[in-house]
Image (cartoon, rainbow, N blue to C red):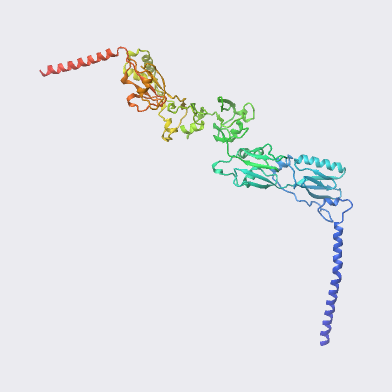
Amino acid sequence: MRSLRKGAQTLALRLLIWFLALTFTAHPIVATAQRRNKEITRRPTRSGIDTFSSRTGGQATEGELPLEIGTISKAAFDAVIRTGRYVLGPGDAFSVVVDTDEELIAKEVFVGAEGTLVIPYVGAVMVAGKPLVQAQADIDTAISGRFKHLDISVNLARLRHFPVNVIGEVKFPGAYLVNGVEQVSELIFKAGGLLDETKGRASLRNIEIRTASITSEPGNARKADMILWNLTGDIRHNPFVVDGDLIFVPVKGDSVTISGAIHRPGSYEHAGGDRVADLVRLGRGLRGDPSGSTAEVLSLKTDGLVRIQVDLEKALNEDPTSNVELFAGDKLFVHGDEPRVTLEGEVRFPGAYPVTRELTLKGLIDIAGGFTELAGLRQSSVIRRVEYGVGAEEDVKLARLLNLPRNQLTDGDRAYITMKTQQIPGRLPVDFVGLFNRNDLSQDIQLKGDDLIRVPRLRPTVLVNGSVVSPAAIPFDPSFTVQDYIHRAGGFTDNARKRDVYVIVGSTGNSAKANEVNTIAPGDAIFVPAETAGQAWRTFRELVTVASQIATLVLTIVAINR
């Protein structure tokens, strides 16, 4: 038993010795074989075709290419790649595919720092700074000059990344990496969006894309219009950036205004080159059928207000005779069936304006650009069309009274003539000075269709007329009284009724006794009536009649008492 156990131990020891010896002997042989295999792999082939392949010691299997292909959106492909507008630069990757009839071999090559694309066994081709379509033509020319029967295809595989600076009215100005198929809106988003977006301080329609030239000076700037891009989806309003671009977001500038039969009337930021059709798009289109629609452009020039009639149907079809260019401050009024108010006189943009439920006098003046420097607020008025139902009998009466001599008119007749001739029918009692100078909103009336708002030119004078020596318009002086203005007009005439002087208030057209007026304002008028012929005799006759009637009454009472 002991001899069997000893024999088993001896066998196990011999097996262990043999295993260790085999291991130490085989390891150098395996290492040498692996080293030789690597040397064979690195050894160049005679044809050199393998230099196109990224595989070592083998070939691509069917349906597989050893290339990394970048992905982009369809919009970017259509706008940048398919059109050939993409500008190449260092870092762009190309796939070089060779069809040897026996195998399909592929390799990826990059545009170098000096701007050349080194194609194996073809040579270096300068591609940096060239549009893709031009670079592709140069590559095809270089290949055809070296190989006549070998099918070599060179195509753009992956786009490089490059920095683009975003400055101006954005939250985080700076440089951001892009890959050549990103739009201006994406760069603004990367920069944190617009600065004070809720306040509308940043421009949305005049964003500049500045491209540096070879001399490092900015070239011609392109424009981006975020509002029109959101409305139309036109890539021209939100272009793709290229290497060397700088995006500048300026402060919001002047505006143009559209009103009338439009879905979104209002003021919109003006962009250079804006035309009637652009402003209609900003206003979300016409309300109703554009066939036969017309509009009017109001443009304030140095020589005055210019009105241009526009055929909207032609303008929307890009007819240059109707689709006229608009300038900062212009207003476009689209004619429609809605009621309108008429604003005339000393405002920036007089004319007809559509009436909305929210339109007030102050709002209308704001839409019209405000008053001019020559506006006379005290003489301004709002006139509302009214239907009095005045009959022919009253018109005949007025005509008859106007034909009578003044000495035959009674005081009632004169009052009737004054009411019919001096007062403006429908004039509303609105204090323009209180509303616009003192912000008295109680005077901000709601406007209605066919209202007429007149803003005459300021007359810094007070008219003195009637029975004065030299009737004239006297220059306004805030320290003058009624007597001072009459004195400046030469004083009373001999037949003046000095106690009956009255003042016609320019802002309302109402008249009041001179002794009841505290202040005289520019545009007011002072009228001195005259004694009419026979007035003294008529007064004496009336006094005698009254006196005789009193005497008769006294004698009657005395007789009764007796």
- Residue placed furthest toward the right: 46
- Where residue 265 sits, quadrant-wise, is top right
Residue drawn at (66%, 45%) of the image: 165
- Where residue 235 sits, quadrant-wise, is top right
Q: Position of residue 226 (x, y in %)?
A: 61, 40
**In the depicted structure, whether residue 538 falls above or below residue 225:** above
In the rendered view, does 89 fall on the left or right side of 355?
right
Which residue occupies the foreground of this view, 87 or 62?
A: 87
In the rendered view, does 8 fall on the left or right side of 545?
right
**In the depicted structure, whether residue 400 falls above or below residue 105:** above
Q: Position of residue 318 (x, y in %)?
A: 64, 30
Q: Position of residue 85 (x, y in %)?
A: 73, 40
Q: Quadrant of the C terminus?
A: top left
Residue drawn at (81%, 87%) of the image: 2
Which residue occupies the foreground of this view, 246 or 74?
A: 246
Which residue occupies the foreground of this view, 459 or 117?
A: 459
In the rendered view, does 291 fall on the left or right side of 397?
right
